Amino acid sequence: MAGGAKAAAVAKKLTKSTKSKKGTRIHTKVHFYKPKTLSLERKPKYARKSVQVKNQLDHGIIKYPLTTESSMKLIEDSNTLVFIVDIKANKRQIKQAVKDLYQIECDKVNTLITPRGLKKSYVRLSKDFDALDVANRVGVI
């Protein structure tokens, strides 16, 4: 008998739940929204790239000056230098690069993309600087 009473006590404990029973949730809306789960920040064991990627435009915005007949004519007539520049460079970056490289001030920069896929920039120099002198210094002429 003692074994039967012991088994009944264990069975009673197993059937009795310690957690409170909560009723089913009443949905008041037509649409069901998936609950937001916890998203933890990634903590990688090692870096996926061994070398940090440098900004491509930090160096080499200006690739080379253009030395065609039409660019020579622009140098002489309209105080404008012509450069082939990086395809991703914008006008402000080109202006700053010209200022840093050649220590000259620009009035304005015009750009176009050639059919060959190169970006050409026309840099108009300010009245204080002569494009012919700068072209001699750069080695265009």
Image (cartoon, helix red, strand yellow):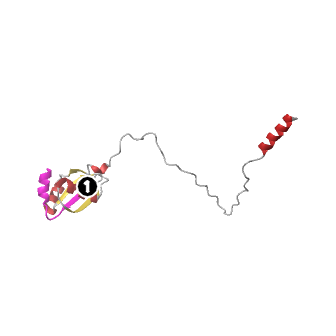
Position of the N terminus by quadrant? top right
Q: Is 35 left, or right, of 23 in this rendering?
A: left
- Spot occupied by residue 61 in the image (x, y as percentages of width and height): 26, 51
Q: Is residue 116 visible?
A: no
The stretch drawn in magenta includes residue 137: yes
Q: Is residue 124 visible?
A: yes
- 99 above or below 47? below
> Of residues 131 and 96, which is closer to you in this image?
96
For disc 1, the marked residue is 120
Residue at image location 85% in from the left, 38% down from the top: 5
> Given the current orientation, which residue lies at the most extreme front position?
2
Q: How many marks?
A: 1
Describe the element under mark 1 as helix, strand or loop: strand
Q: Residues within 10 Å of mark 1 (few under 14, many from 20)?
A: many
- Whether residue 121 appears in magenta in the rendering, the answer is no
Residue 2 image point, x, y percent:
86, 35
Left/right placement of residue 43 relative to residue 34 reads left
- Residue in view at x 14 percent, y 54 percent: 135
Q: In the image, is 42 to the left or to the right of 91?
A: right
Q: Say left or right for 69 vs 33.
A: left
Res 99 → quadrant: bottom left
Occupied quadrant, residue 28? bottom right
Q: Does residue 3 sit above or below 90 in this rendering? A: above
Residue placed at 40% from the left, 41% from the top?
Answer: 49
Magenta range: 122-141
Q: Nearer the viewer, residue 94 or 135?
A: 94
Residue 80, x across and y down, in percent = 18, 60
Which amino acid type is shown beneath numbered disc 1? Lys
